[in-house]
Image (spheres, grey):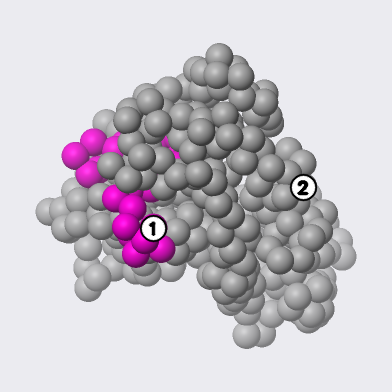
């Protein structure tokens, strides 16, 4: 097959490209340039798709003897990832920009161009498996990326290859070292790549502007503080709340709700964070391409590095209603919920969380 290897400049994509060459495919390497302005993306080990990464990807391509190109996706990245990130925070939701980048840039935009140019598939270094068109968890639980790829459509998965699904990270690094790749020991990238100094609240304030609002106690309705922008908070946050005085019971307060119109941030005791049910009615994707039979038993994961927990799922009026066997904390609108089969192996589907019900609310 004629294959396009998405090369981030890291060790995973380098080994994935090499394995595609070993398999006999006609491979071309491509690196995605996501910013036209130097300094607007992180650099070094904390970055992703930086200038240094482009050089690393070229060196690997030279070793493999494959053609190599850099494609400018900066406009798409700004529109579909950065602007989406700002819009979600402005609306009081908590987005996952890495998930959106995978969905909109590394697969939708990249794959569309690859197919248009006559490539049969795109190969990436994601740690995820693909069996009969269905996403599977990686054999390396610590590196599994099925959560951030569960938003891919069956059509996209049909033109994608994931060679690392059966390899641990240790095995990937060993393979890179065996091949003489300089990236064999390169640290993994992390954090939000388009916030160079890592100060998310400062970045949001700069882009959205300071908008003071009240911090309100959920139990008493009392205004107990003032903030400089509701976008600086997320559900479950404990520190940096700007509270004027401690709670009457002396216990910590946590962010429970964000109301973007009035700018009100509601805080309260940890017991209010116990979520027993969520609704997810936006961006619903089923990996098989068709809706499973509901109601069903499954496991649900609501954070990229969270555990998948037992749930009961119903589909009512095109909205997923997910009920947890045991309360789960730290759930915020805007996050994605990914459903796995009961063995916690295969992806059933994914959707964006639009509402939640706490145990305290359900008992009223």
Quick check: can you spot residue 241? Answer: no
Circle 1 Cα neighbour tier, 10 Å, few/some/many (<14 / 14–19 / ≥20): many
Q: Is residue 239 left or right of residue 101?
A: right
Residue 120 painted magenta: yes
Most distant residue in the bottom direction: 261
User: In the figure, residue 321 lies in which quadrant?
Assistant: bottom left
Identify which residue is drawn at 76% across, 66% down: 37
Quadrant where the C terminus sits is: bottom left
Residue 107 position within the rendered picture, expressed as x and y whole percent measured from the top left: 42, 56
Q: Residue furthest right?
A: 244
| Rendered view: 64 above or below 292 | above
Q: Nearer the viewer, residue 357 or 29?
A: 29
| Residue 244, visible in the rendered structure | yes
Closest to the observer, 216 or 174: 174
| Residue ID for mark 2 | 43
Which x, y percent locates residue 173? 57, 21
Q: Which mark is residue 257?
A: none
Look at mark 1 in the image and give the residue it sits on: 114
**How many labels were placed on the picture?**
2
Q: Where is residue 313? Give x, y as percent.
A: 25, 53
Instruction: Say which quadrant the N terminus sits in.
Output: top left
Residue at (33, 28) in percent of width and height: 23
In the orientation shown, which residue stands out farthest toward the left?
Answer: 293
Residue at x 62%, y 85% (from the top left corner): 261
Label 1 vs label 2: CA separation?
27 Å
In the image, the segment drawn in magenta is 113-137
Towards the viewer: 87 or 362: 87
């Amino acid at each position: 097959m004629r294959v396009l290897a998405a090369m981030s400049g890291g060790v995973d994509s380098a080994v994935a490209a090499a394995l595609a060459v070993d398999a006999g495919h006609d491979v071309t390497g491509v690196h995605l340039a996501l910013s036209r302005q130097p300094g607007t993306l992180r650099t070094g080990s904390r970055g992703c798709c930086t200038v240094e990464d482009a050089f690393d990807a070229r060196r690997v391509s030279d070793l493999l003897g494959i053609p190599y190109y850099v494609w400018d996706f900066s406009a798409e990245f700004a529109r579909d990832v950065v602007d989406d990130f700002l819009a979600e925070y402005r609306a009081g939701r908590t987005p996952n920009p890495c998930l959106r980048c995978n969905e909109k840039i590394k697969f939708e935009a990249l794959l569309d161009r690859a197919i248009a140019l006559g490539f049969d598939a795109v190969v990436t270094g994601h740690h995820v498996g693909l069996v009969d068109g269905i996403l599977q968890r990686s054999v390396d639980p610590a590196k599994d990326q099925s959560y951030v790829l569960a938003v891919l459509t069956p059509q996209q998965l049909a033109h994608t290859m994931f060679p690392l699904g059966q390899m641990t990270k240790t095995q990937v690094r060993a393979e890179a070292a065996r091949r003489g790749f300089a990236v064999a020991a390169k640290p993994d990238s992390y954090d939000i790549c388009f916030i160079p100094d890592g100060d998310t609240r400062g970045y949001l304030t700069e882009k959205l502007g300071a908008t003071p609002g009240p911090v309100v106690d959920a139990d008493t309705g009392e205004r107990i503080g003032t903030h400089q922008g509701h976008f600086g908070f997320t559900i479950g946050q404990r520190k940096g709340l700007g509270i004027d005085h401690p709670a009457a019971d002396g216990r910590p307060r946590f962010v429970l709700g964000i109301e973007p119109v009035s700018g009100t941030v509601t805080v309260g005791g940890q017991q209010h964070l116990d979520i027993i049910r969520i609704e997810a009615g936006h961006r619903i994707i089923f990996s098989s391409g068709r809706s499973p039979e509901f109601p069903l038993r499954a496991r649900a994961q609501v954070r990229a590095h969270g555990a998948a927990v037992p749930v009961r799922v119903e589909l009512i009026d095109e909205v997923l209603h997910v009920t947890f066997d045991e309360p789960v904390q730290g759930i915020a609108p805007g996050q994605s919920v990914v459903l796995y089969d009961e063995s916690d192996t295969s992806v059933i589907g994914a959707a964006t969380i639009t509402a939640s019900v706490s145990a305290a609310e359900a008992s009223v």
